[in-house]
Image (cartoon, helix red, strand yellow):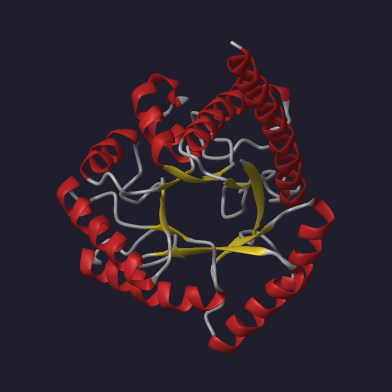
Amino acid sequence: MELHLFKTLWGHAGSLDDAILACREHGFNGIEGPPPAVATERESFRAKLNDTGLEFIAEICTAGSYVPDRQASPAAHLDSVRQLGESAIECRPLFLTIIAGCDAWSVGQSVDFFGAAMTLGGALGVMVSFETHRSRSFFNPWTTRDILRQLPGLKLTCDFSHWCVVCERLIDTEPDILTLCAERAHHVHARVGYDQGPQVPHPAAPEHYTALAAHERWWTQIWRSQLARGMSVSTMTPEFGPDGYLHTQPFTNEPVADLGQINTWMAQRQRQRFAEFHAGTQLNSMTLNRT
């Protein structure tokens, strides 16, 4: 199994050409972000990625931006999947990672919606993976568990940083749910949350090591499950971002760290961790074969 790392466009202030250069410089395999809204721009977007050999993961949000329209019905969310999915596949993504649903829905409403969304993804001919995200249906571990149990084919984009702030603790307290999520994990957003927020100021800082180590345990559990499932590629996007996630200084509003540097640091660290993980699994396999 290989690890493919993606550069997020969230918080990227430059052009697509700048993002492509950053991918080349720092060894990213591709880009993750929303596809362009205009058809001609999608054509140019696809052509540039094709020319550089970079992969694309399309991110879409249903019925609003990251926070949904509270009054939008499940049917309106499904229309978002259809409309945005049709546009996204023009860019030939590996898959769609979808921020979907609403935290105020009942489990039954969510199960009906995600079942229909999975069917729609199949009709569009594209893999769909749904993110664990605040304000959405998968906003906490227990609701996610209850939905997953009723939809055995549903795949997750695991961003456990959201759950840390929702639950106000590191979620090692929920080992059975972490195991279930690992079994359903298709993609990982590598951001480190903590008990009072979805993003530590800088994951390299020693005062945040406990939170970093916890997330890395959960990501390693996902790698083990993906390897056992026979996946040839595991995808991961370091996704530290702006919009109140990045801490700033009072009065000046100056960022306490550089987002590009943080995400590059995270990519390099997870690349090294995965190499060690892969070497360890190969060694274990050789030992078992000898016995």
Report the front residue among 66 and 16. Answer: 16
**What residue lies at 66% left-to-right and 49% top-to-bottom?**
5
**What residue lies at 76% left-to-right and 66% top-to-bottom?**
20
Q: Is residue 17 left or right of residue 220?
A: right
Q: Is residue 64 left or right of residue 231?
A: left
Q: Is residue 196 left or right of residue 47?
A: left
Q: Is residue 6 left or right of residue 145?
A: right
Tally of numbered tags: 0
Report the front residue among 258 and 278. Answer: 278
The outermost residue toward the left is 108
Residue 179, horizontal then vertical, whole percent: 39, 28
Quadrant holding the N terminus: top right
In the figure, 224 relative to 32: above or below?
above
The outermost residue toward the bottom is 40
Report the front residue among 290 and 270. Answer: 290
The outermost residue toward the front is 290
Task: Give the quadrant of residue 184.
Answer: top left
In the figure, 291 relative to 14: above or below?
above
Task: Give the quadrant of residue 101.
Answer: bottom left
Residue 247, horizontal then vertical, whole percent: 64, 43
Quadrant holding the C terminus: top right
**What residue lies at 69% left-to-right and 71% top-to-bottom?**
49
Residue 67, horizontal then vertical, whole percent: 40, 58
The outermost residue toward the right is 25
In the figure, 91 relative to 172: above or below?
below
Residue 83, horizontal then vertical, whole percent: 37, 77
